Amino acid sequence: MSINRRTFIKNTSLVLGYSLLPYANFYANSNQKQLGVCLVGLGNYSSTVLAPALQITKHCKLTGIVTGSPWKIPRWQKRYNIPDQNVYSYNTMHQIANNPDIDVIYIVVPTGLHAKYAIRAANAGKHVWCEKPMAKTETECQSIIDACNKNKVKLSIGYRMQHELNTRTIIGWAASKPYGNIKTLRAEIGYNVTNPARTWRLDSELGGGTMYDLGVYALNASRYTTGEEPISVSAKQMTTRPKLFTETDETTHFTLTFPSGTVAYGKTSVGKSMHELYVDCENGWYTLAPFSMYAGVQGKASDGTLLNIPVRSQQALQMDDDSLSILNNTPVMVPGIEGMKDIRIVEAIYEAAKLGKEIKL
Ligand code: NAD
């Protein structure tokens, strides 16, 4: 494919503008200590993704764990060299307040428990990282923000895509509009889960639901791609397996309208595989596909521009970015308000689907 001058300049400036940014920060602060991170909840995401990522982060490292499953402790201690005094249960985690090895408490439990433990973490006087989706309700999100403000600690939400370098390019395009105004966009995320386990993800009390678990990626992408907040939402939900999805949605389609007139069409499902963000503009288009997987996020635009900056670990990038904002006392990239805005819209999406009518936001 021939690459024209505009494409070359755009790609080069993207590489220089984004990929070097964290390292520029790193060299400026290379004498700084690594922050100690304590993972709360040693389930799948902590075990298979976050703990390994914390072995390659530059500005933070794994120093503590909180778990309700004592049998997991010896394996984690041995593998990650975690001393006895840095191991806690959910009932003792308030004692982290007295532990100088731990600077950040990262909440990685079921969504319906985020608020409970994020508030406990903030009250221990430690910075809080909270997994997405931030919580079940806007009220819970606000209570996390209030607890962090009261305790003067920083709060970051684990939206890894907002740290991913190709995604950052299109976030920048929301303002610079290289292809003109956005007319419509499609954001679709789904997996064909043929035999979903009966875990908290099917339990509405614990924060289950496809719109919470996966749909927030499509919703967040709609917001960061446009740089706007939606003014109305309509939605419908359907299931092909009603015996399984008794409390939660299997598939949700939603439509958002934005003040500029842009319309976003979102889809999420655990019955169908889909992973695309497609943005149709006045003077061209661009796409990321996949736009939300752990690796391999890539895309292109109508003029041949390629979005293919390699990223070794989105989670390491995220945790390093969030550590730097603590070490340098600068604003975090994805604050609590960002998570809360999504949850407000998620609640409206469920309401619009239930009522079968458009809801003004
Ligand atoms: P998981 O079910 O594998 O792990 C959940 C952990 O919470 C387990 O260790 C479990 O023992 C513990 N837990 C504590 N109290 C519990 C209770 N009452 N009921 C059930 N479990 C309880 O889930 P996961 O996939 O690790 O997800 C955890 C969090 O991480 C969720 O908020 C999820 O949305 C988020 N997550 C984010 C990403 C991402 O890409 N950012 C990916 C996966 C999961």
Image: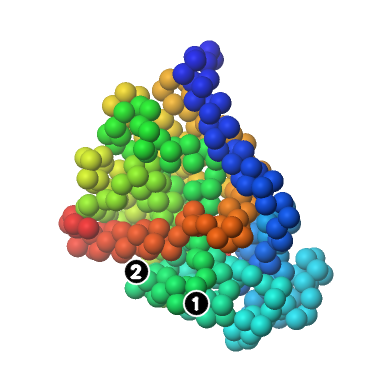
Amino acid at circle 1? Asn
Q: Which mark is residue 266?
A: none
Judged from the image, the secondary structure of the residue bearing numbered disc 1 is loop
Based on the displayed image, in which of its 4 quarters is residue 37 positioned?
bottom right
Q: Give the mark nearer the N terminus: 2 vs 1.
A: 2
What colour scheme does the image use? rainbow
Tell me, yes or no, if residue 78 can be seen here. yes
Question: For the residue with label 1, is its CB less than 8 Å from the closest atom of ligand 1?
Answer: no
From the image, state whether disc 2 or disc 1 is nearer to you. 1
The residue labelled by disc 1 is: 151
Amino acid at circle 2? Glu
**How far from the left and from the top, in percent, is residue 46?**
63, 63
The C terminus - image quarter:
bottom left
Choose between 328 and 249: the one closer to the eye: 328
**How far from the left and from the top, in percent, is residue 13?**
53, 28
The residue labelled by disc 2 is: 138
- Vertical position of residue 177 compared to residue 321: above or below: above
In the rendered structure, the answer to whether residue 351 lies left or right of residue 287 reads left
What crowding class fits label 1: few (fewer than 14 Cα within 10 Å), some (14-19), or many (20 or more)? some
Q: CA distance from mark 2 to mark 1?
A: 20 Å
- Vertical position of residue 128 compared to residue 164: above or below: below
The N terminus - image quarter:
top right
**How far from the left and from the top, in percent, is residue 257?**
24, 46
In the rendered structure, the answer to whether residue 151 lies left or right of residue 353 reads right
Q: Residue at x 56, y 69 (%)?
A: 127
Tell me, yes or no, if residue 57 can be seen here. no
